[in-house]
């Protein structure tokens, strides 16, 4: 990783990310980077991202940048307490934020409706933005999230991950598979899709006590806490 | 002339493909368009009968592709209008008698002389359906408001999408407002929610269709029939006109008719 990095953050302006712990080499690196890009980030929103070691130099870095016409709007650091807060722009603490793990990075997205006879397979989590119609199949080694109506058959945790869940805005699957478990909808509910398809709320299917359980999203999220 | 190939298909059988093909073909012809309609349901031909042209068949589509006859020898002119021609299906053969390439070649030839080439697809998703799908510029999918028909239509839409046939529209056939109101039948919106393609028409259930079919007089010729009116709107929409969807309501019985009915009982 580079020692000093300037990243564009879309509507959030720019972020200066510093991964060096020695103040001398920080200023040296900053000078090199700013030589080519200081005209771009002047008069924009700039945040400064520091790690747990170099945040001691926060004040020095901010002053150094100020001399070169760049004012910092906020500082992003891991722990607020370890910093002397005088004369420092608002501090954004990363202490309680969750950094995405490598496992969670694998998320596939499918946009569109999945039709009868089609199927999707994904390594990791799978997000489907659209409806999943009857007689279609979706497989994911991780979780499945359907932002739409789910009438097809989902298999979350394909390969045996029993911690995976199936989420859908409206869950009507005749069968749900998670890990090595399989469940089917109660007979009396089959084919009621004509009559009462409107009164649904988001639901989640997960494994509890070696059984696939379907719960409303609201109830499930309470259990997670 | 650069004609357009319209394929009419459904997946499930018996939802009204041939009836719709007959009505759309005849309707477009009566509006002054030059139309040729090809029955691709080889071995189970019906379109000739629905159009009332059964007794005029000499050559059929298989004869054309096998070069037994000339193209214009197999085109049967409609008895009501000079604008409509039918190419009938062969009855003694099956779907494998023609290939998709041959149908594409045939429609390319017909595009020179006609505004619309209507292909009446057989039920199913096998060879016969593929023959009807490959040449299509636009596909009209027919479904009825039943779960089985809607699911089959969904399957067909998926196959069409994967073959890059994106010009699709939907006709919901045989909708019965009383059953919809009772909640026993899927409503127009229920169907659209699943299929999610543009709607081009809703045809109400019409008990006269059976007799129209049997006599070879499609409902579009019967100006008083509700299904005929629905098809007329569909024709206008195919021709690019903006027509509001008609309200399909239960038949309202006035006070007088209720009293008369009461005494009849």
Image (spheres, coloured by chain):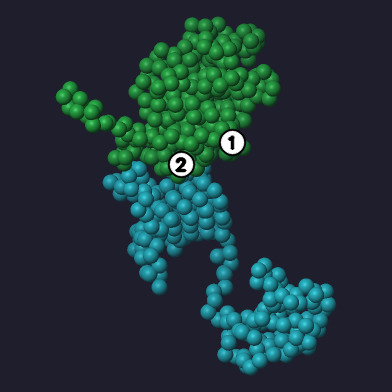
Q: Please state which of residues A74 and B69 is positioned toward the viewer in this rendering.
A: A74
Taking B170 as reference, is A31 above or below it? below
User: Residue A26's quadrant in the figure?
Assistant: bottom right
Location of residue B211 in the rendering, given as x and y in whole percent from the top left corner: 37, 16
> CB atoms at circles 2 and 1 under 8 Å apart?
no
The label number, if any, that marks residue B192 in the structure image? 2
Q: Residues within 10 Å of mark 1 (few under 14, many from 20)?
A: some
Q: Please state which of residues B226 and B54 is positioned toward the viewer in this rendering.
A: B226
Check disc 1 and report the residue beneath it: B167
Location of residue B59 in the rendering, given as x and y in whole percent from the top left corner: 57, 8
Q: Residue at x 54, y 59 (%)?
A: A124
Q: Colour of chain B?
A: green
Tell whether B65 sits left or right of A21.
left
> Quick one: label 2 or label 1, which is nearer the N terminus?
1
The label number, if any, that marks residue B12 in the structure image? none
Q: Name the element at disc 2.
A: helix
Location of residue A131 in the rendering, given as x and y in whole percent from the top left corner: 48, 49
Report, in whole angstroms, how far the alpha carbon at label 2 lies from the one at label 1.
16 Å
Question: In which quadrant will I find the N terminus of chain A?
Answer: bottom right
Chain drawn cyan in the picture:
A
Tell whether B18 sits left or right of B177.
right
Q: Residue at x 40, y 14 (%)?
A: B214
Q: Is residue B181 visible?
A: yes
């Amino acid at each position: 990783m580079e020692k000093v990095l300037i990243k564009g953050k879309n509507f959030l302006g720019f972020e200066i990310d510093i991964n060096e712990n020695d103040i001398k080499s920080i200023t040296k690196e900053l000078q090199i980077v700013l030589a080519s890009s200081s005209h771009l980030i002047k008069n924009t929103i700039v945040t400064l991202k520091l790690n747990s070691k170099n945040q001691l130099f926060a004040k020095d870095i901010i002053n150094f940048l100020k001399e070169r016409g760049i004012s910092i709007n906020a500082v992003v650091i891991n722990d607020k307490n370890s910093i002397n807060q005088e004369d420092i722009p608002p501090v954004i603490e990363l202490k309680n934020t969750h950094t995405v793990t490598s496992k969670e990075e694998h998320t596939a997205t499918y946009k569109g409706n999945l039709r009868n006879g089609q199927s999707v397979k994904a390594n990791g989590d799978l997000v489907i933005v659209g409806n999943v119609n009857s007689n279609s199949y979706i497989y994911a080694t991780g979780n499945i999230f359907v932002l739409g109506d789910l009438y097809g058959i989902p298999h979350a945790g394909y390969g045996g991950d029993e911690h995976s869940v199936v989420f859908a805005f409206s869950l009507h699957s005749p069968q749900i598979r998670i890990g090595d478990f399989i469940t089917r909808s109660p007979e009396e509910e089959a084919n009621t899709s004509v009559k009462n398809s409107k009164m649904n709320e988001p639901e989640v299917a997960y494994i509890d006590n070696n059984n696939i359980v379907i719960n409303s999203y609201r109830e499930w999220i309470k259990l997670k806490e | 002339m650069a004609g357009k190939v319209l394929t009419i298909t459904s997946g499930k059988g018996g939802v009204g493909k041939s009836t719709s093909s007959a009505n759309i073909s005849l309707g477009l012809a009566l509006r002054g368009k030059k139309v040729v309609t090809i029955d691709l349901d080889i071995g189970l031909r019906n379109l000739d009968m629905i159009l009332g042209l059964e007794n005029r068949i000499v050559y059929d589509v298989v004869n054309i592709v096998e070069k037994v006859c000339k193209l214009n020898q197999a085109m049967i002119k409609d008895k009501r209008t000079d604008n409509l021609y039918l190419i009938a299906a062969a009855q003694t053969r099956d779907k494998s008698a023609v290939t998709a390439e041959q149908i594409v070649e045939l429609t390319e030839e017909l595009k020179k002389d006609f505004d619309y080439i209507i292909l009446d697809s057989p039920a199913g998703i096998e060879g016969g359906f593929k023959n009807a799908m490959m040449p299509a510029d636009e596909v009209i999918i027919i479904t009825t408001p039943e779960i089985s028909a809607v699911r089959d239509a969904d399957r067909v839409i998926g196959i069409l999408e994967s073959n890059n046939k994106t010009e699709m529209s939907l006709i919901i056939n045989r909708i019965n407002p009383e059953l919809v109101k009772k909640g026993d039948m899927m409503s127009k919106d229920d169907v659209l929610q699943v299929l999610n393609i543009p709607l081009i028409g809703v045809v109400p259930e019409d008990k006269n269709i059976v007799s129209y079919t049997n006599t070879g007089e499609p409902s579009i010729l019967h100006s008083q029939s509700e299904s005929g009116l629905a098809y007329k709107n569909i024709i206008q929409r195919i021709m690019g006109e903006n027509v509001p969807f008609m309200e399909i309501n239960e038949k309202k019985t006035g006070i007088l008719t209720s009293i008369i009915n009461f005494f009849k009982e």
